[in-house]
Image (cartoon, coloured by chain):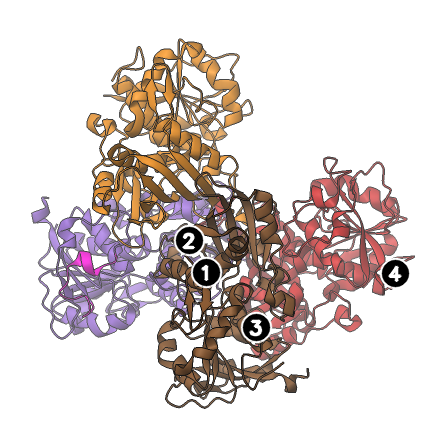
Chain colours: A red, B purple, C orange, D brown
Amino acid sequence: MTIEERIPVAVLGATGSVGQRFVSLLLRHPWFRLAEVTASERSAGRRYGEAAHWLQSEPLPDEVAALEVRPTDPTDVHLDSRLVFSALDSSAAERVEAAYAKAGHFVVSNAKTHRMDPDVPLLVPEVNSAHLGLLEHQSAHAPGALLTNPNCSTIGLVLTLAPLDAAFGIEQVHVVTMQAVSGAGLHGVPSMQMIDNLVPHIGGEEDKLETETQKILGVLRGDRIDPAAIRVSAQCTRVAVVDGHTLCVSVKLRESPGLDEVREALQGFRSAPQELGLPSAPDRPVHVLDQADRPQPRLDRDIDQGMAATVGRLRHCPLFDCKYVALSHNTLRGAAGGSILVAEQALAEGRIPGLEI
Amino acid sequence: MTIEERIPVAVLGATGSVGQRFVSLLLRHPWFRLAEVTASERSAGRRYGEAAHWLQSEPLPDEVAALEVRPTDPTDVHLDSRLVFSALDSSAAERVEAAYAKAGHFVVSNAKTHRMDPDVPLLVPEVNSAHLGLLEHQSAHAPGALLTNPNCSTIGLVLTLAPLDAAFGIEQVHVVTMQAVSGAGLHGVPSMQMIDNLVPHIGGEEDKLETETQKILGVLRGDRIDPAAIRVSAQCTRVAVVDGHTLCVSVKLRESPGLDEVREALQGFRSAPQELGLPSAPDRPVHVLDQADRPQPRLDRDIDQGMAATVGRLRHCPLFDCKYVALSHNTLRGAAGGSILVAEQALAEGRIPGLEI
Amino acid sequence: MTIEERIPVAVLGATGSVGQRFVSLLLRHPWFRLAEVTASERSAGRRYGEAAHWLQSEPLPDEVAALEVRPTDPTDVHLDSRLVFSALDSSAAERVEAAYAKAGHFVVSNAKTHRMDPDVPLLVPEVNSAHLGLLEHQSAHAPGALLTNPNCSTIGLVLTLAPLDAAFGIEQVHVVTMQAVSGAGLHGVPSMQMIDNLVPHIGGEEDKLETETQKILGVLRGDRIDPAAIRVSAQCTRVAVVDGHTLCVSVKLRESPGLDEVREALQGFRSAPQELGLPSAPDRPVHVLDQADRPQPRLDRDIDQGMAATVGRLRHCPLFDCKYVALSHNTLRGAAGGSILVAEQALAEGRIPGLEI
Amino acid sequence: MTIEERIPVAVLGATGSVGQRFVSLLLRHPWFRLAEVTASERSAGRRYGEAAHWLQSEPLPDEVAALEVRPTDPTDVHLDSRLVFSALDSSAAERVEAAYAKAGHFVVSNAKTHRMDPDVPLLVPEVNSAHLGLLEHQSAHAPGALLTNPNCSTIGLVLTLAPLDAAFGIEQVHVVTMQAVSGAGLHGVPSMQMIDNLVPHIGGEEDKLETETQKILGVLRGDRIDPAAIRVSAQCTRVAVVDGHTLCVSVKLRESPGLDEVREALQGFRSAPQELGLPSAPDRPVHVLDQADRPQPRLDRDIDQGMAATVGRLRHCPLFDCKYVALSHNTLRGAAGGSILVAEQALAEGRIPGLEI
């Protein structure tokens, strides 16, 4: 596909931390072409290169720096791109995203706002692409639609739970997270809190882990999702890591497989995005590491372009059936990259009328 | 007590990280006077001020700097101090500590070597001072004796479990630790591992947490300890914190108390060291913090002179009965300070023949 | 002095980072009693214990937690305390401090706003207590007065330059700083910037170092300060340290002393606060360390209650006469503690009419 | 070139930190094929994949993991590769490198051992490729030869000094470094020193910066280098950064150019490796950044594949002519990548008899 033939896409809230990740990933995307960017009133009308305090490691290409920033205005939606990625925070998302969908856009959102809406799919394409069926029931947002990407700590969890649930049935999950600071945005966590310190609390995060996991692993029945009957207990902490959420997971299964079988289920996990060969799909959704001291965020977060989870220290748990340590990249797989993969899956399934690849 | 009247004590392995903490705490101890220090052959014969690369924040007093370092030689034990604190690592402890006990010394050790020996008490004075009764059965080490201090991550755990076990009976404990680098000694953890990173593995640590907890919460029956019938699952990680181990704990109880009762049991916990008014005893073994984002290592580790545990985020657990975050100072309460408190308790109970306060 | 006999003082902007340090130091001050606290409108009327997100390591006493927070309102100044410490940031200071002085208060400020005003002393009591003579010329602020404390990085520099200037005459100073994050306040430096990173820029800081140094080392002539004819070149950087600014200093002197003489000038430095035995004065303003790898922020910032500078690596410079590394605590000596020492010096000299100790 | 046609090369000391960087870079090198690896006796005979604790972010290919590790034995040199990269530390280099050269190998070394030898070129190809002429005079090492790569902090300095020296003549250089921990190897800097801390001392580093700079910027006259008559004053510190050395540089020039001219000299700098289009040559040896707070290690170290220096904050210096902040990647440009570029330059000039590209 030449760059002119690619599908034009827009990014809402393109100047912030997640917005920059979207821009960075779209720069080299084989299907998409970044055509439009929006930001707050303050930035509107400026060139993207001036409005964004660009903090990605690759340089910003001139043609993207030259894009005019449009206002993220829900009362006057006038983007040309049918496919829109939203990097808005939840308060902005609440005011904006539904308006864009009603105006005909397919909005893939990284915000928490609509994740638990009954008719909005909360998607991890390897896990629950079947939930795309909900789009047929989104009359409230027609002619467009809303799709959402889970919370950054949920994704790493469900990528590792899904193959275990499929193979052995999951009953209970205990998870303690050690989350990277980038999850809170550029200015989210003061350095005073992260030098010689950690913070054992992230507002609202534990609830997201508990409820999103149940929805994602649930089953589509008609126009709604039956949440999975899995009990989840989460404790979330913030640690001095830039990127990469680490999770200490204990799982109770309905069956009692041996560790080799558990390992095989994780390592052998393949799903729709892999079969379709989607551009942002990791070769393997889960990589099992055998060294005793892995995964480690700095060493392992970038595996498979930052789109896979890694699992280590897989062993029996004296209280549950097995336990392990999981890691995934929170701003790649957990935010911008995950949303792009959602759009790829929807496109590949022909779920976005008028757009095809 | 004038300084001349204080009980002379020795520190084995006084130049290392834990050794320096012992020296630092003994400098201002009201009962003890640091009379002798030992180190490896390489340092023997030198002044302590030259042999130790002093890294404590208070200056080293001249009279201590002038102490001659003796060799930690198990074949030629010749210390004058009856009470000896061992800051040796486990391999040195294995060669040395029993020899000192046989030579008549009461050795309070911070090493793991003898912790699980059937006739050696593994002591947290607030929790199991009754285990001092084992000393009567230590004929193998007579005329001296061996006493041990638990692993640095175990102490914070059992300080918070003990009042819950006494009040409600504990059946299961799930603990994930985020441990400070000082626990591994001055050179234990390379900075390459701790910048923008964490390591989800500490060799042998999980086993210590699981087995030591059972021994400490066990019951003395004649010449042995019946371990507590508590199942413990531990996952240990190392994070970029200097001092202070943070633990995410979930507990299953035999009874089902309300959170207020759990809180009261923790906050109201007092025990023998508090009643005896021991110099190193914290006013309260456990402080419950109500702010949503506490405890934090840098802010809370030094509470009660670093000898108390702090507990925060106490709440119901969807899988166990309750969960909370606990913090304790690993080189104060968890090492040197804990050992000194053990000695104080033993002295106050008259368990060290020939020494009294 | 009983606590009732102590001089009542107020802190403007008491809820912020520097404000909390003032409160913390005043809690145990032998001359002063914290009587009043102010903060922004938002906090006014609340109890200090509720309004302040207390982050100091010692607990907040009940009587201070119970103080009612007053608004920092320049149009309605009504504090009872004659002596007022200002922890306001510079924009608030600009609107407020002069009004308080005109209303009769002696305001000791930590803000940059009035530091370079010709009639306002910029004080490091060990260095230029003679500049208190400016107070007689502050008719604009009568019946009160304004006194200021230098920028946190300037203080460590001038404490080490002053004895060299007195002994040998300084011509040029080249300084590169590595500054702690607390200098920017609780939320000043995002953790994204301080993990696996440093930032080689602090807005306005280099200019402060260059001009404040000249004023402090200048000479009082009548109603103004003749700045010292010292050329200063500063480069400021921010590094992942909580407290303690480290400075790499090269100095060109008029005379060419040997290193022993330079060392002696630094180590032997004593001045008015030491002679007067002021409560916040360090025993020695400068401590020279001889270990090759010192000073280090975490190990050395708290020396002499955090009120002294430490100097290490003193040696010849191939381009200047000598070079060294200096360290001082930026929120103790460099902010709250320094301001309190200024007040102590002014009081001890009888410069605050109506107040005496 | 097919992989079989590539020049076979060996890496001495391939299991350590710098050795792994060599292996990682050679995996994808268009001219070279990693054919042999050596390590200490302990690892000899094992497969590389077992002997090396692989810590690079890309996976180790199977064919490299399968290489048999040979002993780095100076008494029995038997490598087939004529071109050998040495990642040995200086003590091993002293015993080994000359023996390999005498056995006919062209050894490109990253160790300090032979850098200042009169007949050994100390090379930064953009700066002093003319010094390759020394190879004709290395009879002591014939039939092979020794070439060296400068210290990791020297490279970033001379890359930025060279164009200034060429254009305006340099008289004096004052440099303060803030160096990354990877410069000291995997276990070189304990985390106890790097959390909430920095260390203002790196053994031997300042002398290297001062003397190597003079040699590199010197002129080849017959069989020796006349060192440049530039006086250098260096102060080196270690900070909590994984990769990327930051330097605060002040320069006194013979001419007095405007800042625009200085900027142009840096930004416009091109040299032999760029003209030859060497595979490891950066597009530009120096990138000038205009944002006020750059360069920053985490954001800028990887520019131009980590082979270029970045410069920011270029401005007048009140004491020298100009000052700036420079950054370069210490294990890419400063170690393995720099050595490979040296080999490329030597090959492109036909300086390695029997090998051509």
Q: Does residue C163 appear in the picture of this structure?
A: yes
Q: Position of residue D185 (x, y in %)?
A: 43, 67
Q: Residue at x 28, y 61 (%)?
A: B149
Nearer the observer: mark 2 or 1; the answer is 1
Kindly report the distance in space between the C-alpha atoms of the residues bearing marks 3 and 1. Answer: 19 Å
Residue B51 colored in magenta in the image: yes
Q: Are marks 2 and 3 in contact (CB under 8 Å)?
A: no
Q: Considering only order in the chain, which callout, 1 or 3, is on the residue closer to the N terminus?
A: 1
Q: Is residue C93 above or below residue B317?
A: above
Q: Nearer the viewer, mark 2 or mark 4?
A: 4
Q: Which mark is residue D154?
A: 1
Classify mark 1: helix, strand or loop: helix
Dot 3: element: helix
Read off the residue under disc 2: D195
Same chain for the residues at labels 2 and 3, yes or no?
A: yes
Query: Dot 3: within a 10 Å radius of its alpha carbon, few (fewer than 14), some, or many (20 or more) residues?
Result: many
Q: What secondary structure is marked by label 4? A: helix
